[in-house]
Amino acid sequence: MSMLTCIAPVNMAVIKYWGKRDENLILPLNDSISTTLSVEQMHAKTTIMASPHFKEDKMWLNSKEVMFDNPRIQNCLKELRRRAKVDAEESNNGLHSWHLHVCSENNFPTAAGLASSAAGYACLVYTLAKLYGVKGDISSIARQGSGSACRSVLGGFVRWHKGCDPNGLDSVAQQIVPASHWPQLRILILVAIKERNFEMFAELTMKDSNQFHAMCLDTYPPALYMNDMSHSIVHLVHLLNSEKGRTKVAYTFDAGSNACLYLLESDVSAVLSAINHVFPPANDSVEYLRGLPVNIDPLDKKVAESLAMKPYEPGSLKFIIHTQLGEGPQVVQDLDQHLLTPAGDPKFLTPRHDN
């Protein structure tokens, strides 16, 4: 029997991929660029146990048993087992041929446009690669589970190359710069990363997000991800930038209504003051602001007047996560953090997080 637990980060695309040229291999039509977020605030956690005594493969996701015969899971597993035969040490005693029990959970909302599948598949592939002793790049394997998962196996700013090989051998992720390159950046993203030009980065990020969602609306039937709240946040961002006479905050939306805002550390307090003014927390809100601590001053009266936005009902926003750039997946050393018991059963069978 062998068991391992790892965590993997969420990544958010600044330059998104706009479709696939191969659905089975999940090969994109264009390159994409993303930021990897810190696992301290948002991550997927996966525990995998391999045992010669298990009768079948089993998997639990967010405390619920799910089918293990999902084609994408099987594609990842098949490739990892193939690589294990080549890379693994002889001392693993055929570990890669044993049945598996897999338990995974997210500490952030699932299926909400926050790239939960990317973090989940990256964590699955990374954990199994570590368990099997697989060496070398694993981004092409994670890609076969969820396209953007290939970007979550690396930290900082990451580029997913579309590649040209019909078999997808060159469609891999590559780190552009590590998280330490831009420590002042809060929440997400890029383009002129190496120059750390925030205004250029912010403009390109928002334009790409707008074009992506315009394309979604132009399909038939239209794919609607953004809602009225999303558009109000967009409006607020533009008002804030106009009020300051510079671009100090940028938005982007993936396949969901949740906004991801990019800004510098020095602007966090002022921007949160404006957000709290327009979208006040509910009176009984618990952990409305999660993640990195920050002191929020009341919004200046003149700024509030210049924004000219009527405050929404308290609780219109559920909560805010304040995070920063982070590194890639990592092994969890604390054995108490395993999600499986020594017998291979999940420790928790009731939901532990908001979905």
Image (spheres, rainbow, N blue to C red):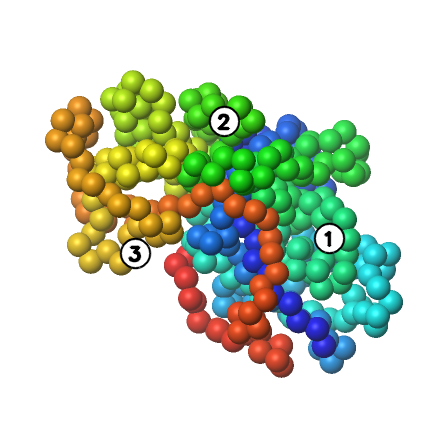
In primary-sequence order, the first of circles 3 and 1 is 1
Whether residue 34 is visible here, answered yes or no, is: no
Viewer-side label of 3, 1: 3
The local secondary structure at tag 1 comes to helix
Which numbered circle lies on residue 75? 1
Image quarter hosting the C terminus: bottom left
Residue at x 58%, y 32% (from the top left corner):
33
The Cα–Cα distance between marks 3 and 1, rounded to whole angstroms, is: 39 Å
Viewer-side label of 2, 1: 2
Q: Which amino acid type is shown beneath numbered disc 3? A: Glu
Image quarter hosting the N terminus: bottom right
Note whether 109 is above or below 155 in the view shown.
Answer: below
The local secondary structure at tag 3 comes to loop
The local secondary structure at tag 2 comes to loop
Q: Which amino acid type is shown beneath numbered disc 1? A: Asn
Residue at x 67%, y 39% (from the top left corner):
173
Residue 217 on image: x %, y %: 45, 28
Which numbered circle lies on residue 287? 3
Total numbered labels placed on residues in the image: 3
Residue at x 61%, y 61% (from the top left corner):
331
Figure quadrant of residue 169: top right
Whether residue 192 is visible here, answered yes or no, is: yes
